Structures are given as structure tokens and as C-alpha cells.
Amino acid sequence: MIEQAGDRLRVTVPMVIGNARALLEAGRARLGAGENVVDLAAVDESDSSALTVIFAWARSVQAPGSSLRIVNPPASMLSLAELYGVAEFLPLA
């Protein structure tokens, strides 16, 4: 689901409603202080729940000096973010 890949966390499952709760919990368990980079290159499917999960992860790392950066987001996620008017809020690297 989420694995450590060097200095990044790598999501390995579709970011869809059926996986949202487990992804949220798995991400929160792995995110920590400092810079957190989450790689979505292996995500081949996403829906609007993916945006909810990412925004929840971002809220969970709001300690001073901590951040969340998303790399390699799927095009479908970016398209949904544009459609919903939240693209500028995505913590893209």
C-alpha cells in the first residue's frame, strides 16, 4: 500500500474510495517530522478521495519545520483538482 523507497514514501495501490481509509491511516503512520515526500508514480487510478487523503496528510504534518510534497501525481488527480478548484492547494514538489 505505502512503502519506504529511499527517502520517499511510495503509494503502490489505486487512490480510490475503496482504499481511502487504509491509505489515510497508513500515510499518517509513516509521515513524520521534517520533509515528507510521497511518490505517486505507481498510482494508476485515482478519484476525488485521493485529494481528500492528500489534504488530510498535509494537515497531519503541520508541525514547525515539517512539510509534505507530492511527486509524480497521476494526470487524473491533477485534472480533478483543476475541476474542483483546489489545484493550487496541492503540495506538489
Image: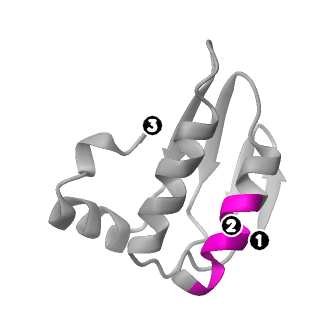
The reply to whether residue 71 is visible in this rendering is no
Residue 62 picture quarter: top right
Q: Amino acid at mark 1?
A: Met
Q: Residue at x 59, y 47 (%)?
A: 57
CB contact under 8 Å: marks 3 and 2: no
Q: Amino acid at mark 2?
A: Leu
Q: Secondary structure at mark 3?
A: loop
Q: Position of residue 32 (x, y in %)?
A: 77, 32
Q: Residue at label 1?
A: 1
Q: Position of residue 87 (x, y in %)?
A: 25, 50
Q: State the extent of the magenta-drawn residues as a range.
A: 18-25
Q: Residue at label 3?
A: 93
Q: Secondary structure at mark 2?
A: helix
CB contact under 8 Å: marks 3 and 1: no
Q: Position of residue 20 (x, y in %)?
A: 60, 73
Q: Amino acid at mark 3?
A: Ala
Between the residue at mark 2 and the residue at mark 1, the CA separation in whole angstroms equals 7 Å
Instruction: Please tell me whether residue 54 is drawn above or below residue 2 in the rendered image.
Output: above
The reply to whether residue 86 is visible in this rendering is yes
Q: Residue at x 56, y 61 (%)?
A: 40
Q: Residue at label 2?
A: 23
- State yes or no: residue 21 in magenta: yes
Residue 91 picture quarter: top left
Q: Closest to the observer: 41 or 32?
A: 32
- As drawn, is 7 to the left or to the right of 84? right
